[in-house]
Image: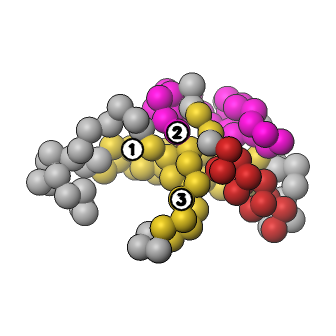
Amino acid sequence: MVTITEDAAKFINELLEKNSKVGYGIKVYLAGMACSGPQFGMSFQKEAKEGDNVIESDGFSFFCDDETKEVLDPCVIEFVDDPNFGTGLTIRDPNASDCSSCGGGCGC
């Protein structure tokens, strides 16, 4: 099961409010694969669509298809505020190891 940190939930609720999307949820989808693992995308979504799994969290829902849900299973959705990388959400797999196919830097 995916875990959503308290700070991430707060950020999402503020984001929904700022964008006049109160009552919407967040669609999480696989956007491709990189040497460091799956890459995800997120977008606003009003309600579940056919084939969506629904994950309830702190006043909003996450929607994802079966493939994305399987990949998200051990992941943590976190809020980050880093001067080098910006502010937003990140999806981290606590079981992932460093990238070895590109020399470990993962700057692919």
The span shown in magenta is 52-76
Q: Give the Cα distance between marks 1 and 2.
A: 13 Å
Tell me, yes or no, whether the two marked residues, 1 and 2, touch with CB atoms within 8 Å: no
Disc nearer the start of the sequence (1/2): 1
The type of residue carrying mark 3 is: Val
The correct choice, above or below, for 8 with respect to 54 in the image is below
The type of residue carrying mark 2 is: Val
Quarter placement of the C terminus: bottom left
The type of residue carrying mark 1 is: Pro
Mark 1, secondary structure of its residue: strand
The correct choice, above or below, for 74 with respect to 105 in the image is above
Per the image, the residue denoted by label 3 is 80
Mark 3, secondary structure of its residue: strand
Q: Residues within 10 Å of mark 1 (few under 14, many from 20)?
A: some
Disc nearer the start of the sequence (1/3): 1
Per the image, the residue denoted by label 1 is 38
Magenta stretch encompasses residue 67: yes
**Point 59% across, 34% down: residue:** 3
- Figure quadrant of residue 56: top right
Q: Is residue 51 left or right of residue 32?
A: right
Q: Residues within 10 Å of mark 3 (few under 14, many from 20)?
A: some
Mark 2, secondary structure of its residue: strand
Tell me, yes or no, whether the two marked residues, 1 and 3, touch with CB atoms within 8 Å: no
